[in-house]
Image: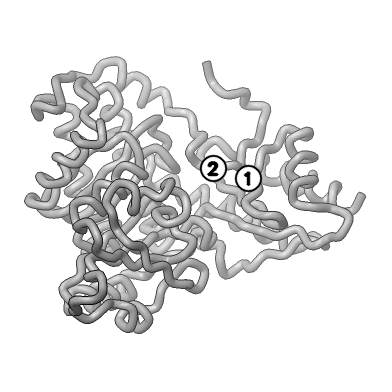
Amino acid sequence: MNRDDRFVDLRSDTVTIPTETMREAMRTAVVGDDVYGEDPTVNRLEALAAERLGKEAALFVPSGTMGNQIALLTHGRRGEEVILEEQCHIYSFEVGGPAFLAGLLTRPLRGTYGILDPLEIQETIRPESLHTPRTALVCLESPTNRGGGTIYAPTLLQDISRVAHNAGVAVHLDGARIFNAAVAMGIPAAEFARPADSVMFCVSKSLAAPIGSLVVGGHEFIERARRFRKLLGGGMRQVGVIAAAGIVALETMVDRLAEDHKNARLLANGLAQIDGVEIDLKQVQTNIVIFAVRRPDVSASMLTQKLREGRILVHQISADSIRCLTHKDVSREGVLQTLELIRQIMVS
C-alpha cells in the first residue's frame, strides 16, 4: 500500500515511493546468493555503480550508515583518528558508530555551511608522535545535510585530498546524495568521486529506490570492506530483488533531480518573502531547504504541528529550525500549497 498521497511530505527524500518500473524490475529480478557472489543482479548493480563513480569496484549495502561505517572500519584501526565536520552525518547521526564499531577517535571541525577548509584540515592532521593518535582518515559530506545541501566543488575536493594524501591520510566521501551534486553543477558524479579513496552513495534517497547504498573504491579496498559487511550482518543473500530497483534508479532517476532542485529553489525563494522566516538562500544548492522561525508568538514546533494539521509534513531539526527536502513525490503544486499555508500561519 502506498503512503497517503494527500500529504505533502517534505520531511526527507527517504520517503519516496518506488516507481512502477522499479516494482516490476524487483518482481522479475534474477537472483542468487550474494554472499557467495552469485547474485547476477547485485553484481550488475555494483558494476554500474563503480562505472558511474569512476572507481574499480563497488559493494552493495543495506544503508548509507552501514556503508559509511564499513568505510571507517576499512580505512582505520582502533585508536586512530578521523577528521570530519561537526554536523556531518557520520559524526552526528550514526549513533556513535566510529567509536563503538571502529574504535576511532573523532576530531570534529566547524565548517562553513558544512564545508571544511583545506588549510584547517592540514593544520589538524597530527604529526607522527608516540603520544598522540595517528590521523588515519578525513571524512567529507557532499552535498551536506545540516549544511543545507551545500556542495564541495571538485576542485575543493582535490585540494583537500592532496593535503590528506601528502600526509599519508585517506579520504572518504559521504556522497549520500552525490547525484544531486552532479546534476546541480552539471558535472559527472565521477568528478566528485575521483579525489576520494572511497565514496558511499544512496539509491534510497532522491533516486527513489526502496533500500540500499553503494560503497565504491579500489579492488583491494572493496574486498576488505566486504569482510566488514559480513561482520556487521550485511550479507543479504538473494538481494537481487532489491538491487534491481537500484539499477533502475541509476538508469532512470538521475536527470530528473533537476526538477527537485527547481522546486527547492521555489520553496526557498517563497520562504524568503515571508515575515518571521529567516533563510540563507546561498545554502540552497540542491534539494534541501533549511529555515528558521523568528517570531516570538510562533515557534518552530508550533509551525510544524500546524503544517501537519494542514497535511504538510516537515522536519524540525532544532528549537527554531525546520528542514524540508524536495523529491519526486513533491510537485510544484505541493510546494506552492506549503508556502501558502506557512504564510497563513505566520500572519495569523
Q: Quadrant of residue 253?
A: top left
**Which residue lies at the image location 34% right of the left edge and 55% below the top edge?**
174
- Residue 326 image point, x, y percent: 56, 46
2 and 1 marks in contact (CB < 8 Å):
yes
The type of residue carrying mark 1 is His
Residue 270 placement, left or right of 11:
right
- Residue 42 image point, x, y percent: 19, 31
**Which residue lies at the image location 39% right of the left edge and 78% below the top edge?**
117
Q: Residues within 10 Å of mark 1 (few under 14, many from 20)?
A: some
**Separation (CA) of disc 2 from disc 1:** 8 Å
Q: Which residue is mark 1?
A: 315
- Residue 108 image point, x, y percent: 42, 67
**Which residue lies at the image location 51% right of the left edge and 34% below the top edge?**
15
- When the figure is inspected, residue 222 is found, relative to residue 130, above or below; the finding is above
Q: Quadrant of residue 123?
A: bottom left
Indicate the secondary structure of the residue bearing disc 2: loop
